[in-house]
Amino acid sequence: MTTPSVAPVLRMLLAQTKCEVLMRWRVPAFSVTNLVLPIVFFIFFGLPVANLRSADGVSIGAYLLASFGAYAVGNVMVYGFGIGVANERGMKVDRLMRASPLPPLVFMLAKVVTALAFAFLALVLLIGFGIVAGGIRETPLVWATVILRLLAGSLPFIALGFAIGYWSGPHAAPAIANLIYLPLSFASGLFVPLGQLPEFIQNLAPFLPSYHYAQLAWSALGAGHESLGVSLLWLAGYTALFLTLAVRTYRREERAKFA
Amino acid sequence: MTPVVELEGARKRFGAVEALKGVDLTIGAGELVALLGPNGAGKTTSIALMLGLRQPTGGRARLFGLDPNDRRARSRCGVMLQESGTTAVLTVAEIVDLFRAYYPSPLPTTRAIQLAGLNEKAGAKIGTLSGGERQRLYFALAVCGDPEALFLDEPTVGMDVETRRAVLDSIRSLSAAGKTIVLTTHYLEEADQLAHRIVVIDHGIVIADATPREIKSRIPSKRVNFHAETAIADVVFKGLPVQNLEIVDHRVHLLSNEPEAVLRGLFERGVVVRDLEVTGADLEEAFLSLTRRA
């Protein structure tokens, strides 16, 4: 007999990802919040000023698209993982999964791939809306850079989402995700440009992860406040911090349930 | 041939409670074994150790000769657990298809769904299933990988009579096809109908490990009730084959495998018996009395 003793990992990953996509798509709390909410925010905060330019010639419309793009991707990650993982723990999905031959890493990787796909879709819809409805013009290369940087830089928010998901219960997770992510986004100048925010928030912003995350997109438009290296360093630091929290909460759960 | 399951002096402590107090159990390929015991006896903990869902605090657990957490061992097992859930928004066929992907050579999706008797619900969202249908779905997830061994923790809980019969039939045919099956139940009748071997667990130890026939022979099969004309005490029954003796005033209730011998003994000792009833004992009640005694 030459039957393989375990299933191929790629086949598992594909099947798992397909189901993750279906699950996220069919729950409006995820799909609508992920894809529609950033556009609604942009309609309120961005469209009215879409055709203005700053003193140094940057399109305000494009700047705000980049800001809401950063908000949108972080949103997909923090909510998707935070609430998704907490819900699955509440439904005891983990017990059945744990007894199955699926490696836990593949289970998590499928979630990450799915979240990246939704984040990509959210960005395409948001930027497409800005171009069509707001007449905002940048070169395709600029948009591609914004999208790529936001996807690649989302790691700290994936880690933050996992930490919330393992730390909180299914009922508390939405509140906790909101309480952390909304103020973070606001204070980082993602909804209203920093210059228009109170001074203490302007002083606070440079210590926040979403501030440095948004720099990745703003600097692609020539409107960054710091060099790419500095942004990446801050994001790496926050990734380490959130990942430590996520691993600690995950281990705590492992000890309680599977020790 | 490597046994499917090996527990060697397996102990499991949860805080102050010792759920398993040294279980030795070997299950070979092709066996159909029922772990039988009242709620809280340690059946679920035993299954959890076999599957690596819990780690023993003493002794050792092996699955196909490997660490139970080894993916090669897991890939040869299908499981149905109590207290586990799954998403509500996928359809039955979608999730069965997903679980098939975890195994090297799974059954066709329709075959797994058919074995669980869920054909008509294949396109239904999991959230719309009744409790019994959900149990059948978990059964489908356990068998869809065409694994060599099935671990079914209380597989028929929450099922109506018809569903239960269908699932028990599926279990029998899987066993006939050579699968190793380990199931837990707290019904002696179910274990008796299905298993070739019954392992009785109580208070965290194995108190019996034998064929259904042997187990039943140890359990008192008759209930005897009567009214004694004069007040009698326990000592009257000394040396007679009685169990679960209860004397309330003049009413006497007892269980026995040999009611004739009991009555003969009582007559010889001059006990005057009225309103005598000898009936078949309720199997489950008799069995529970056995475990309580241990």
Image: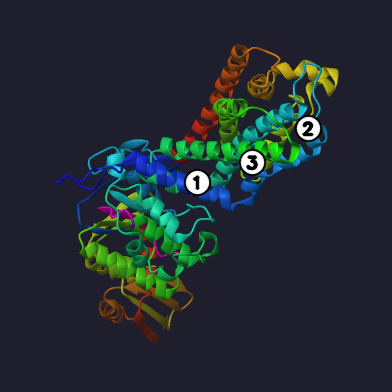
Tell which of A106 and B194 is nearer to you: A106
Tell which of A77 and B230 is nearer to you: A77
- Asked which quadrant contains residue A9, the reply is top left
Q: From the viewer's perspective, is B154 left or right of B146? A: right
Could you classify mark 1 by the number of other residues whose Cα lies within 10 Å: few (under 14), some (14-19), or many (20 or more)?
many
Q: Earlier in the sequence, mark 3 or mark 2?
A: 2
| Residue identified by numbered label 1 | A20
Q: CA distance from mark 1 to mark 3?
A: 20 Å
Q: From the viewer's perspective, is B126 left or right of B33? A: right
| Residue type beneath disc 2 | Ala
Q: Position of residue B202 (x, y in %)?
A: 37, 54
Quarter of the image with the C terminus of chain B in it: bottom left
Q: Position of residue A185 (x, y in %)?
A: 72, 29
Q: CA distance from mark 3 to mark 2?
A: 16 Å
| Residue identified by numbered label 2 | A50
Q: Secondary structure at mark 3?
A: helix
| Residue identified by numbered label 3 | A125
| Residue type beneath disc 1 | Glu
- Asked which quadrant contains residue B128, the reply is bottom right
Q: Is residue A247 above or below residue A206?
A: below
